[in-house]
Amino acid sequence: MGIFKSNGSGSRPAGGKTIIAAGCKISGEIKDLGGALHIDGHIDGIIETDYDVSIGDKGIVTGLVKAKTIVVSGTLEGKVACESIDILSSGKMLGEVVCGEMMIESGGKFIGESRELTEGGLIVSFPEDEKTKLENQAKSAVEMIKSKNAITDDIKATDAEAVSTK
């Protein structure tokens, strides 16, 4: 009498979670996973999967990551493409993100650039009027800096003339 019963099919459905344990360092590519990936160690390279990727508190990922969803509790540095990314309170994301949805918990850090991913997979850029507004702000900032430099140069010249006439 057995507790476990086998129907003899011998095949298990794909979809087990892959765990990169603390202290483990991988350099290279991780592709074609059959399920979610959890990282407590260090990965330097490319991760490409149709499943979820989570980075634990001590986990570090440097490179390119393409996944369905990404949850960051540790550190992620590089370029990311996903449907959604959650940066938890202990998480840090440094780099470029292209995603449909982004959530940053209080205490979580995001330093970089983000762009929206549309349903068709195309990146949505700034609307033309917003782009023009940003360009005008940049131009006026440059003009302001130039005028301050001109005023500073005039003051220095005036001071130099005053010193030479004494």
Image (spheres, rainbow, N blue to C red):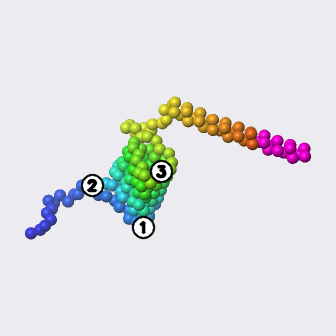
Where residue 165 appears, as percent x and y from the top left, is 90, 44
Say if the magenta span includes residue 142.
no
Q: Residue furthest bottom?
A: 1
Q: CA distance from mark 3 to mark 1?
A: 25 Å
What range is drawn magenta here?
153-166
| Cα distance between the residues tagged 2 and 1 | 27 Å
Q: Which residue is mark 3?
A: 110
Residue 5: % across, % down: 13, 63
Q: Residue at x 50, y 45 (%)?
A: 113
Question: Which comes sooner in the sequence, label 2 or label 1?
Answer: 2
Q: Position of residue 34 (x, y in %)?
A: 31, 54
Side of 2 relative to 15 (left or right)? left
Mark 3 Cα shell of 10 Å, populated few (<14), some (14-19), many (≥20): some
Q: Which residue is mark 2?
A: 14
Q: Residue furthest top?
A: 129
Is residue 29 among the parts visible in the rendering?
Answer: no
Which numbered disc flags the more N-terminal residue, 3 or 2? 2
Residue 152 circle label: none
Question: Which of labels 3 and 2 is toward the front?
Answer: 3
Q: Residues within 10 Å of mark 1 (few under 14, many from 20)?
A: few
Mark 1: secondary structure: loop
Establish if 145 lies above or below 12: above
